[in-house]
Image (tube, rainbow, N blue to C red):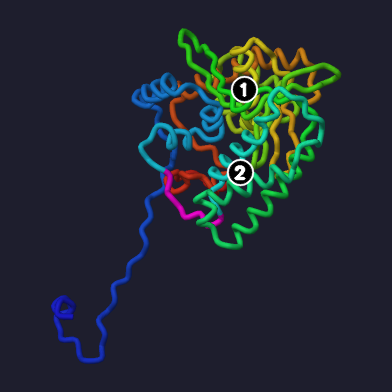
Amino acid sequence: IWEEEKRQGRLIPPGEAPRSLITMPMRSVPSARPGVENTRACRTMLLTLLRFRGVSPSLLDSFLACPLAFFYGQLSPLKPLEEVAEEGDPPALGSLIHKVLQDFFQPYQNQFVPAGSLDGDALADLFSERLEQEAFFRQMPAHARLMLARTGRLRLRDFARNTPACTPREFEKRLSAPLALDAQSFELKGFVDRIDQREIGGEAGLVILDYKTGKPRKPEAGFWDDADVWDTVAARDVESGLAMLPELYKGLKSIQMPLYMHTFWKQTGEHAADAAYVCLGKGGVEAPVFGGMDAEAVREVVENAVPGLAAFILEMMLTAPRFEPSPSAGCAWCAWRQVCGGDSGSA
């Protein structure tokens, strides 16, 4: 009060409260260009990352989805804000389900499994037993634990019933193959959940499978015949490629499974007839990546188009002048939304 009286040059009479200070929240001035310059230091760091960690499908996908988010996640010292997840830990749940399925299928390796013959109750019981041991599960509210336990059992029973006739050959297979970009060579790396031998079109063929607890991301019909895309890739037109990045990502969705098929072929010399996402959230219904496409056309894509596209994405990463944002509906749950400054939420 004495400081306020000195400021006003008068005594404040009893009963008259001093004027309260009014504060307004201050926000940073939005940048006109929220992107980040791809400096020589960025390129050096990226080359180091690519040479020591290799090239994974998730790395390529993250650049396609949003170059700026790719920069924050791979090249900046920032870490995502840790948030309390009362409804569970999706990555931990995904890892648990993958391990449960691997252990469940192990006794069936190289044995023919008739369609719908798997013991759904045994699979559900194994899931329940492992789930009870998980720290994230014990930290969830009671209603969320009950819902997850019941839903998980139901989905896995459906998965067992919907599994087609197959001979499981390999589980959790590590893949590795070289990828050339000019005079440089990088290592493609992948991790396949399961490889089956199945009858496809009257002939035995291999199918690469990826378990998905979320929505599968497979290329749109017609993507492999899109002249705009492949003319740009063939010309190695980085400027046009960066300009069409949102359309490219929308059409491709993810390079994961096509790149797995290419890497598998380079590593083993065998061609997989197809790849498929196993949609666990839909009871194990499968979403083939190339379903219905001619076998020779699939081989052409796997041998030539896929590595060409992967190398072009790498070239865009390394030579783009800036890491620009790609606004989409995904901005709402992006880990970097607080620092982006882009037009978040617009699609």
Q: Is residue 294 visible?
A: yes
Q: How many marks?
A: 2
Q: Classify residue 279 as left or right of residue 188.
A: right
The residue sitting at the top extreme is 183
Quarter of the image where one finds residue 158: top right
Disc 1 to disc 2: CB gap under 8 Å: no
Circle 1 crowding by C-alpha within 10 Å: few under 14, some 14–19, many from 20: many
Q: Is residue 292 above or below residue 269?
A: below
| Residue 166 x/y as whole percent | 77, 27
| Residue 326 x/y as whole percent | 54, 37
Q: Marks 1 and 2, how far apart in space?
A: 29 Å
Residue in the foreground of this view, choosing between 215 and 62: 215
Q: Which residue is mark 1?
A: 260
Q: Which residue is mark 2?
A: 347
Residue in the foreground of this view, choosing between 122 and 162: 122
* Magenta region, residue range: 80-87
Sequence-wise first label, 1 or 2 = 1
